[in-house]
Amino acid sequence: MLSKYLQKYVWLVVGLYSPFLSAENTITMAFNKDPAVNPQYEFYLKLYTEAFEAIGFQFDYEFLPSARATQMADHGRLDGEPQRVYGYAQRSPNQVRVEEAIFTNRTLAYSMDPTLKLDDLESLRNTDFKVDYLSGSVWSQKHLESVVDVRNLRAVDNPHQGFMKLVKNRSDLFVVLEVIGNRILHTSFKQEPTIHVVAEIGSNLSYPYLHKQHRALVPQLEQALRDMKSSGRYKELLYQTMPYLNKL
């Protein structure tokens, strides 16, 4: 009998002091960026709060380093992740993809040359443009290396540097995600109206993922997100948190 009482005591202590156990009727996702300072994750926080409320759940998040966030969600210590690419389900079978995209990640090419016209990534082939991209962007590096002369391709440490090189005429194009590029233009380069988007050269969708223990919630979340899109609420929250996305 004593062992049963001890077991109950242990579970009580774990419930009180573990920050990673979700309260009943609450879905807690692993965020690897802080919504207090990252507008994209602020958008996710608002969107998921309303979407889960519509299906009878409260929403919460834990802000963790990227690798730790993935580990916690994959092991079921947290309930899922807010955004992952379509193929993530193959690498993480413990998590189930929600078949309604949460966000469209667009990669844009910016320039100060008003005469420069591009249709897509392939338009850069056999050109002599000096092209910069953001260091650490695997997609940009891989795809730009396939069409841009390596002598004309450079990685920059941060988006501010990429735009400054355009302003100082040290590059012809800066390639970066829309959510990063437009935010920097909106906050730091308002006095440079000549910087403009010349092309969308890449795009991929991100999806919500829930741990397999919540498989039954997947179709409900899918429908909630579809309803928010059809009602216009999705775009309302999107442009409320990231008004600079409404410029393209």
Image (cartoon, helix red, strand yellow):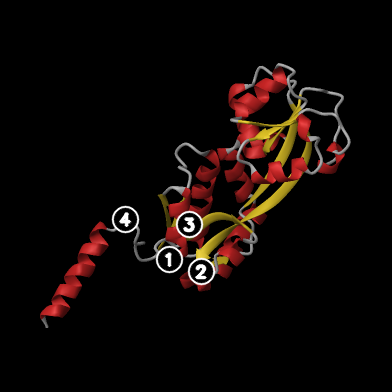
Q: Which residue is mark 2?
A: 94
Residue 167 picture quarter: top right
Nearer-N-terminus badge (2/3)? 3
Nearer-N-terminus badge (2/1)? 1
Q: Is residue 134 above or below residue 42?
A: above
Residue 171 shows up from this direction: yes
Q: CA distance from mark 3 to mark 1?
A: 10 Å
Where residue 119 appears, as percent x and y from the top left, is 86, 39
Q: Which residue is mark 1?
A: 76
Q: CA distance from mark 1 to mark 4?
A: 13 Å
Q: CA distance from mark 4 to mark 3?
A: 16 Å
Residue 88 picture quarter: bottom right
The quadrant the N terminus occupies is bottom left
Question: Contact (CB < 8 A) between labels 2 and 1?
Answer: yes
Q: Which residue is mark 4?
A: 19
Residue type, numbered disc 3: Thr
Nearer-N-terminus badge (3/1)? 3
Q: CA distance from mark 2 to mark 3?
A: 11 Å
Q: Which residue is mark 3?
A: 70
Q: CA distance from mark 4 to mark 2?
A: 21 Å
